[in-house]
Image: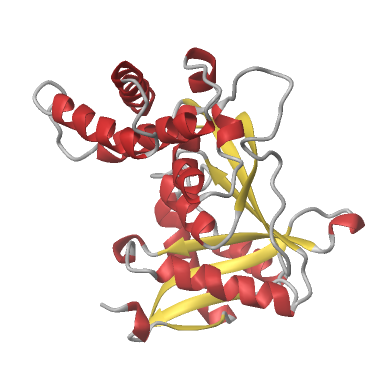
Amino acid sequence: MKTASLAIRLATPADLPAINDIYNHYVPRSTCTYQHEPETAEARAAWFAQHGAAHPVIVGVRCGEIVGWGSLSPFRTREAYRHTVENSVYVRHDCQRQGIGSLLLADLIVRAKAAGHHVIIAAIDSAQAGSIALHLRHGFVHAGRLHEVGFKFGQWLDGVHLELVLGRPNRVAAVPGKPQKRSYWTVSDALMGTSHKTAVACLGLGFCTDATGTSFRTNSTSELSAAAAIACQTRAFRGHDISAINRIASLKFAFMLMAWKYFNENTPHDRIHRLAEAGLRYGRL
């Protein structure tokens, strides 16, 4: 069904059961939330009571059904943080990949500006590539990675923070190409740029980390951007019933072509080969 028919409005207390149902579906199944136990109706009501005009809760309604919701919440309780909010967006599990999340996030950004907020923070699990990509498309930039801050499903989880500074272009922590004291770039450095290819490579942040920069040292940020993109694409193919023996060679060839797009014609073939190997290796982690 087309997202053009989606109506977005402020949530009411009557919407809380649907909001909770959407959220609780993910609690035992996904790292999109670090909560272990389903949210109770009482806890959801208390959460809703803490929101208001400055920190709205919205719902997306289609054909009379709530198919997604979003919210702006205080980022921290200290007074100096009062102009910063944290956003949440959840789409009903059977309505994903229909543009609903994008419409909800866009609406939250408009409301944040109208409320006079200065910065929106998105705290996302590093494995949630879709959510990271969604925020990047709406102008968010990477603000940092927190290593092993969560524990769920028997594994340590890394959290990624993205930020959107409202009312002006976002600052970035580092710009590829600027002189640095070290002789090589890590993937984190490469992903801080604003170019299109670097933005695409940001999708691989949750899968590459600085390990790529350690074992695949280079003074070319474009090579690292390509490596990150390759790793992301490798991970994206997981779950699609790919035979690791019969099809990995064709995937490797495709990734080598992808890498070639980031280089000039003078790049040695063996370097392309090594890059494809690195991207495939880290994408399978």
Q: Is residue 47 above or below residue 174?
A: below
In the rendered image, the residue lying farthest to the left is 246
Q: Is residue 71 left or right of residue 168?
A: left
In the rendered image, the residue lying farthest to the front is 266
* Residue 68 locus on image (x, y percent): 44, 70
- Confirm whether residue 158 shows in the render: yes
* Image quadrant occupied by the C terminus: top left
Q: Give the number of callouts.
A: 0
* Residue 217 locus on image (x, y percent): 52, 16
Q: Is residue 138 above or below residue 250?
A: below
* Residue 148 locus on image (x, y percent): 59, 27
Q: Is residue 11 above or below residue 227?
A: below
* Residue 7 locus on image (x, y percent): 44, 85
Viewer-proximal residue among 26 and 263: 263
Which residue sits at x=45%, y=29%?
Answer: 223
* Image quadrant occupied by the N terminus: bottom left
- Confirm whether residue 149 shows in the render: no
Viewer-proximal residue among 32 and 235: 235
Q: Is residue 82 above or below residue 14?
A: above
Which residue sits at x=71%, y=26%?
Answer: 180
The answer to which quarter of the image holds residue 24 is bottom left
Q: Is residue 270 left or right of residue 51?
A: left
In the rendered image, the residue lying farthest to the right is 79
The answer to which quarter of the image holds residue 227 is top left
In the rendered image, the residue lying farthest to the top is 215
User: According to the image, what is the colour scheme of the structure?
Assistant: secondary structure
